[in-house]
Image (cartoon, rainbow, N blue to C red):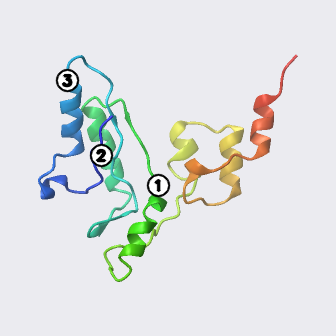
Amino acid sequence: MLQSGHLIDSTAHQLPENYTLVAQAYRRKPIKPVLDGEPIYEDTPDAVWLLKHIHGPRASPDAVRRRACGRTRNCPVRFPAAKRRHRSSAALPAQSTSWPVQGPSASRALGRQDGFWSAVASAARLRFWGAVKPPKTAWRFASRRTS
């Protein structure tokens, strides 16, 4: 696992892009799976800009083309402390996007339309769908024994 960072333009800070780090890690012997543990996060205040939804997906294909086995996903709500420290700074705006479960991520991206995602999707628009506690009915069907 490596941490490529969440800068839009790493080269502006004399840092390598995430795909370069993945390629370097993959070239080590013996060859092992590489996971990007700190990709670009969407909708987060980062230094002097606000990352948008177009920046995160750019990093994923670059890493996968360089043989990364995957990447982690994070959520903007983990940055409230930065916002509080810099109250007067317009460069650190609040989270502006509410990510719907029915959007292009979540169940549609996974190709899943099972009961769990349907129950979660009908609940509400969520800021971080990965932290949602599933409704009890979703587990009732999974735990039922067949005779």
Q: Residue furthest left?
A: 14
**What amino acid type should be assigned to the residue bearing mark 3?**
Arg
**What amino acid type should be assigned to the residue bearing mark 1?**
Cys
34 shown above or below 76:
above
Q: Residue at x 41, y 42 (%)?
A: 72
Q: Residue at x 50, y 47 (%)?
A: 105
Judge left or right: residue 12 versus residue 50.
Answer: left
Depth check: give the residue in front, 113 or 117.
117
Which tag, 1 or 2, sits closer to the chain's start?
2
Q: Residue at x 35, y 73 (%)?
A: 92
Do the residues bearing badges 1 and 2 touch, measured as CB atoms within 8 Å? no
Q: CA distance from mark 3 to mark 2?
A: 21 Å
Q: Mark 1 = which residue?
A: 75
Judged from the image, the secondary structure of the residue bearing numbered disc 3 is: loop
Q: Mark 2 = which residue?
A: 59
Which tag, 3 or 1, sits closer to the chain's start?
3
Residue 131 image position (x, y, % from top left): 58, 50
**What amino acid type should be assigned to the residue bearing mark 2?**
Ala
Q: Mark 3 = which residue?
A: 28
Judged from the image, the secondary structure of the residue bearing numbered disc 2 is: helix
